[in-house]
Image (cartoon, rainbow, N blue to C red):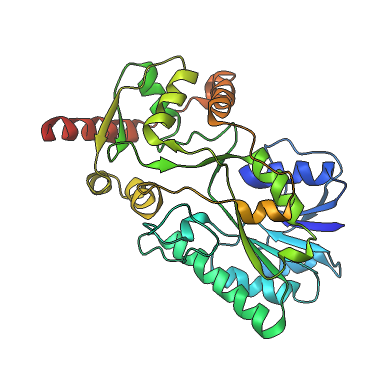
Amino acid sequence: MKVLFIGGTGIISSACSRVAVEAGLQLFHLRRGKTGRPLPLGIKLLEGDIRDPASARAALGSQTFDVVVDFVAFSPEHIAFDLDLFRDRTGQYVFISSASAYQTPPRSLPVTESTPLDNPFWEYSRNKIACEEALLAAYRRDRFPFTVVRPSHTYDRTLLPCHGGYTVVHRMRAGKPVVVHGDGTSLWTLTHHEDFARAFVGLLGNDRAIGDTFHITSDEWLSWNQIHSLVAKAAGATAKLVHLPSEIIAKHDREWGDSLLGDKAHSMIFDNSKVKRLIPGWEAEIPFSRGAGEIMAYYDADPTRQVVDPAFDATMDKLVEVARRLG
């Protein structure tokens, strides 16, 4: 099976690339050049920029593919170009959407693929919804063979799940408190990219996936207090947690606030029955306790990765003081 990944070197796509090659797929990457992430041998690089139409067309030439996966489409304009470029080039087009597109806050849990798409808080999510709508319209109009996959919070060893990244670990190791939104008890789902990739590759070239949508997540549900405590344990530290409402955090840090109010402030757990019916035997196998250990081993292996953001550290100090005054 001849498969094209647009992108292919990110947190999710790097694992998908490795699993695809191991599965015997003939894998091509359309990307701008070198990457810092290790990738398996055998991937054929088509050097081009998908955001530059002339560059992308020149890189692809007259090639066709059994499957095309776009990991880097974020707006309806990106989808419009892909529809024009791949309409007669592929038997399946896979769009990587986001589980943050689901109704926020959800009216019922667990979330299924039939949960409405509605996120009034986060523009990123609204753009993903618009992308999905454009693909569905193309399917109804022209039978364009799309599949939508909605990852939730998917990580690898390079990605700490806490906003602020290594700065949060630095504070834990220094014995300083860290802020957690709400009371820390809302439930969240963290998915290791290797678990995601094993299910994802099973959807490629799968006729039953055409015209349909799937999320792929872990079945492990953790509170944000537990997530921070597992990170602290892996870092050999103690988590001193201070809690603040997401709305107050948003007043002091807009970026953090948008990601909370539009996504992480609400419990989000998922029913993976649908993808499991298409991929018999698949289960997410890697708990975050193991993932946290991989993350800290990565950061501790090279001190240059231990980047502390002074501005965010100062914001965290300010928020800790706000929480102290609120009692």
Q: Residue at x 35, y 52 (%)?
A: 258
From the viewer's perspective, is residue 233 above or below residue 102? Answer: above
- Judge from the rendering whether residue 253 lies leftward or rightward of residue 143; answer left or right: left
Confirm whether residue 187 shows in the render.
yes
Q: Position of residue 127 (x, y in %)?
A: 48, 66
Pick the residue in front: 140 or 50: 140
Q: Quadrant of residue 193?
A: top right
Q: Is residue 99 left or right of residue 242?
A: right
Name of the residue lying farthest toward the top: 236
Q: Position of residue 135 (x, y in %)?
A: 62, 73
Based on the displayed image, in which of its 4 quarters is residue 173 positioned?
A: top left
Q: Which residue corresponds to the image point at 76% horizontal and 52% vertical from the top-left?
A: 202
Seen from the viewer's position, the closer of residues 237 and 220 is: 220
Q: How many numbered discs sit on the rendered protein?
A: 0
Residue at image coords 29%, 45%: 253
Residue at screen point 85% across, 50% down: 25
Location of the C terminus by quadrant is top left
**What is the x, y in percent for residue 302?**
58, 20
Q: Quadrant of the N terminus?
A: bottom right
Say which of 305 and 275 sits in front: 275
Q: Is residue 1 shown above or below 247?
A: below
Left or right: where does residue 24 sit relative to residue 262? Answer: right
- 174 relative position to 115: left or right: left
* Residue 71 can be seen, yes or no: no
